[in-house]
Amino acid sequence: MSDKNVTFVKDFVIVGFPGLHPNYYVLVSAVMFLVYVCTLVGNGIFLLLFTTNKTLHKPMYLIYISLVVSDVLFSTCTLPKIIAKYWFQDGTISFAACFFQMYLVHYFGAVNSYTLAVMAIDRYIAVCYPFRYHRIMSNRNILILSIIVWVFAHLSIIMMIVRAYPLPYCGANTIIHCYCDHISITRLACTDRAPYSLPAFVYAMVILLGSLAIILFSYFCIILAVLQISSTQGMLKVFSTCSSQLVIIALFFLPRCFYYVAANIGITFNSDLQIAIVMLYSLLPPMINPLLYSLKTEEVKKILFSKLKKRPS
């Protein structure tokens, strides 16, 4: 293709679900709005309890703060735009804004991945080395580790943006997705995307599978340690604590791995189903994380109930 015939796009149009009938736009956007509100409220409650109660300033909750911030920011950078598309038919997003959204989507995804790995390590040390836990997982060490997670996630994602941004984007400018991500954008490039998508795929797999390997190893050791506990009540308590985390971990990692692998080896299926799967694993964990990781714990529930009882009638 000659340079004279190339017209570079100045903006993109987020399509959302391509097969969705206009009669259902309000319903779908209302569901997304409800998910967004629940995410803000659930995570906001824990953040408020954390900032107003020094008894929650413990390693486990300090780690969870990273997850709270990342979940809220991820939902905020993705949901308002697609909700506006369905409510106000405003699906247009500028070229630069689309790439910025792509960066944020993958950045917060990486932060979540690393944070879940840190949480698994925290549970591993708590169960397998309880007497050394407070020395190893001190608040200072957790703070340093959290800073490393947020910085390292930036370094691992920025290369994807640097390589994708200068590609020639011409012709079609429709993003068949609910937000801008690397796969949906680079598919619109007027060039062979293989040299650019393969490194991005490798980055994604290293982040996901590396974190998942740490998590699986940690929980494998936890299970071995739990099986040695003679008390049935003790075993049930540990399994109850870890089971909720395993649910979110499975929901976070498995669909993501399938999505990236399918997109890079040529597996195709219904676009609406594909987007629904992506939205499910992207937006469901931020909404239910507060219930599974914080509000479910006895300590947080006691503080929450005490706050509610103190409210004037």
Image (cartoon, rainbow, N blue to C red):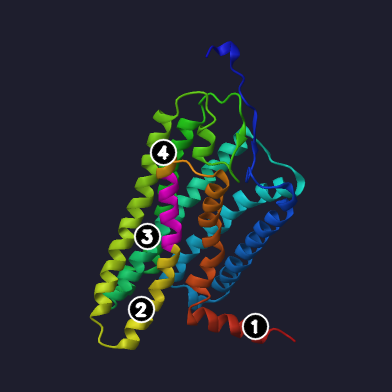
Q: Residues within 10 Å of mark 4 (few under 14, many from 20)?
A: some
Q: Amino acid at mark 2?
A: Val
> Split into 4 quadrants, where in the image is the C terminus?
bottom right
| Alpha-carbon span between mark 2 and mark 3 | 18 Å
For the record, the magenta segment spans 249-260
Q: Are marks 2 and 3 in contact (CB under 8 Å)?
A: no
The prevailing secondary structure element of the residues shown in magenta is helix
The image quadrant of residue 200 is top left
Q: Residues within 10 Å of mark 3 (few under 14, many from 20)?
A: many
- Residue 89 lies left or right of residue 282; in this view the side is right
Of callouts 2 and 1, the N-terminal one = 2
Q: Is residue 107 above or below residue 136?
A: above
Q: Amino acid at mark 1?
A: Leu
Of callouts 4 and 3, the N-terminal one = 3
Judging by the rendered image, the residue that carries numbered circle 1 is 308
Judging by the rendered image, the residue that carries numbered circle 2 is 238
| Alpha-carbon span between mark 4 and mark 3 | 25 Å
| Alpha-carbon span between mark 1 and mark 3 | 33 Å
- Residue 272 lies left or right of residue 154; in this view the side is right
